[in-house]
Image: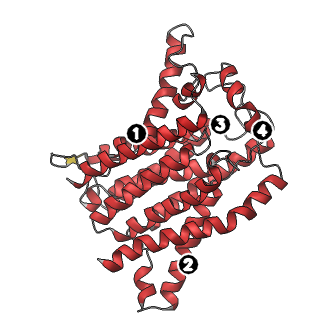
Amino acid sequence: MEINLIKVILPAVVAFIVGMGFTPILTNYLYKNKMWKKKAKTVAIDGRGTPIFNSLHAEKEVGTPRMGGIVIWASVFITTIIFWVFGHLFSGGIFSKLDFLSRDQTWIPLFILIFGAMVGMVDDLLEIKGTGGNYAGGLSLKKRLILVGLISIIISFWFYFKLDINTINIPFMEGINLGLFFIPIFVGVVLLMYSGGIIDGIDGLSGGVFASIFTTYAVIAFSQNQINIAAFCAVVSGSILAFLWFNIPPARFYMSETGSMALTICLAIVAFMTDSMGGGRGIAVLPIIAFPLIITTISVVAQVLSKKFRNGKKIFLVAPIHHHFEAKGWPASKVTMRYWIVSLICAIFGLILALI
């Protein structure tokens, strides 16, 4: 038990230190090369204007660097490699016991994290240059959804055909055997989580939410004795805290797509790996633990549908919903802190259900 706790906690601390160490170098590079949007968003996904959003964020949109998510995934990758190298250099000793990179537990989430980061980085670079398929550059939403959908289909096939996983566990019930329906549900969950990445819109908001989510899944994995997954989630949380150190108001940079895509699709994979694969309920509690992400997506979908079918009438002053609270007069810091509180409460409630 003691060595397992160390295996989870120590890499998280190392990831935080790694992130804190190279972030000033990254920040200097981002500012020196003006790695921010060259023009603010003027058109929403429904083709309408965004005057309220512009009044709230137009100035920071074009003056704050993007790609801060590099801090997160690079810290995760570097920390993983550090423990893997030491584990192989000193095989048979304490370091080999602390190595959490394993084929059965962490290869897939690490690969997904890096895949999402790379696709997200392409989108960020196109946005910075002002080229691509949407309002201010970058990959169009359709292209990003296709890429995320394709990789999720590939991973779902691996789960279903290679790992023989086709069941989802529900609290207080027996597991539900989905058969081939497991594949579309898997893809749907990944896409749903990815859509929640739009929560990255206020200084410190996304970092605090993601940190509590991944910490919760670290505890869930630990309770299932999936120590390597627990260590991986803890490392992600430690990396997010390093990012958050520089992202709290006033933010030095935004997480942007290279961070949000990496984290959201990785989260979906972790949820499936802590479900029937680990004898747990990782999927059933995901809507609770990740409630801030889901309500963010719902608010945007509801807003778009309302304007389309109600002759332009809106439900919110502006979507996503966290910008609605800003438009109502809440200071950005208050929105962020309250989201953190809600995220923590949801995490605790979801954890209780997962451990029952």
**What amino acid is at disc 3?**
Ser
Q: Is 39 placed above or below 177 here?
A: above
Looking at the rendered structure, the kind of residue marked 4 is Val
Determine the residue positioned at 74% across, 42% down.
127
> Can you say whether 134 is above or below 189 in the image?
above
Q: Secondary structure at mark 3?
A: loop
- The vertical placement of 245 against 330, above or below, is below
Q: CA distance from mark 2 to mark 4?
A: 36 Å
Query: Percent position (x, y) of residue 25?
Result: 75, 64
Secondary-structure class at tag 2: helix
Which disc, if any, is residue 140? Answer: 3
Q: Secondary structure at mark 4?
A: loop
Residue 65, which numbered label? none
The residue at the point 71 percent across, 35 percent down is 133
Of residue 265 and residue 165, the one placed in the foreground of this image is 265
Q: Secondary structure at mark 1?
A: helix
Which numbered disc covers residue 82?
A: 2
Q: Amino acid at mark 2?
A: Ile
Label 2 crowd bin: few (<14), some (14–19), many (20+), radius 10 Å: some
- Left or right placement of residue 71 versus residue 98 in this view: right
- Residue carrying label 1: 291
Residues at circles 1 and 4 in contact by the CB criterion of under 8 Å: no
Q: Disc 1, disc 3: CB below 8 Å?
A: no
Q: Earlier in the sequence, mark 2 or mark 3?
A: 2
What is the crowding at mark 1: few (fewer than 14 residues within 10 Å), some, or many (at least 20)? many
Q: Is residue 150 visible?
A: no
Q: Is residue 345 left or right of residue 76?
A: left
